[in-house]
Image: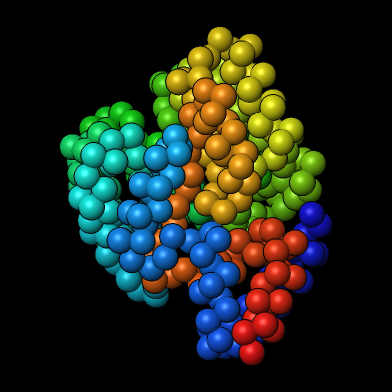
Amino acid sequence: MKAGTHGFVRRVVRTRKLEAAALTSGAAEEFAKTYVAGSTVDEAVALARRLTSQGLLVSLSYLPLGEDNHTVDMLTRVLDALGPTAHGAELSIKPSTIGFSGDGASMPGRLKALCDAASERGAHVTLEMEGVTHFTETLDLWRAVISAHPTLGLTLPADVRRCEREVLPLARNGARLRVCAGAHPVPRALGYRTEHDRDLAWVRLLRRAMENGAYAMVATHHPTLIAIAQDLARRCDIDPEGFEFQMFHGVRPLEQRRLADIGYQSRTYIPFGPGWFEYLTSRIVARPRTLVGYLRAIRDKR
């Protein structure tokens, strides 16, 4: 999809008039049900239990609103509410929700507290990478906690050129690495602009991760890239328990279940929280073909 198309969709979905119409009519909340568990812990837990009953793994991510600084508390509450279902679950956390805009010095302590809670319940945590702005800080945060929690995961977005330099030492230490396309704007000099170049970078990144001992979390919905990941795993003699696929809730759900049915580990990323509307618009921008359905839902609710 061309960058210009994404820019046009971003401008459309984030206009105040459209936002007001979507929220007032209830169309946005109804449309969001495809991609978001809801705004509460109970809704997230209900969806997680339903998906795990279908043989899927789950990754839970809290969506804060504004200056909400309760991310660690909310994710810990989810673990408690999940009970036995928490075993094997992943908590996916954006570093910005635990300190970039505040007291950054206390971030490792907050992250370690969440990792402690997850470890006690047989779950684990993965740090998201929010573009290039905080790349070094996120990597430093991961390094500050990894010795105490060796299963702490790290996300490497393929559209950031630096990831190809960083992946080898991380992989050789057996790190859990989520390889994704990237969802944040990257300056031309620091990243890949075209979809073709990003796909090639994604394959190179995944190959280096798998060939050098990482536990790869294959974050893609692209059929060709899924097939390439399967082939790379076979070439590297990695069995299905040695890596996993990850996809967003609401995107290619049948493929997620198909992968689980044929023996692969397939994990669904479940966002929840009061910041659901911003997340919804980000998903529409990422998948412009959904804009028509969104606009139709608003029209039909009037």
Task: Mark yes or no: residue 33 visible.
Answer: yes
Residue visible at 45% across and 20% down in the picture: 241
Residue 258 image point, x, y percent:
59, 33
Classify residue 100 by image quadrant: bottom left
The residue drawn where x is 28% and y is 36% is 87
**Number of dots carrying numbers:** 0
Question: Which color scheme did the rendering employ for the protein?
Answer: rainbow
Left/right placement of residue 80 relative to residue 184 reads left
Q: Position of residue 286 (x, y in %)?
A: 66, 58
Q: Position of residue 163 (x, y in %)?
A: 57, 37
Q: Is residue 8 left or right of residue 42?
A: right
Does residue 249 lie above or below 228 as drawn? below
**Quadrant position of the N terminus in the picture:** bottom right
Instruction: State the quadrant of the C terminus.
Output: bottom right
In the image, is 181 to the left or to the right of 32? right
Q: Nearer the viewer, residue 7 or 101?
A: 7
Quadrant in the rendering for residue 198: top right
Name the residue located 59 percent from the left edge and 64 percent from the top edge.
282
**Residue 107 drawn at (x, y percent):** 28, 53
Position of 154 relative to 234 (above/below)? below
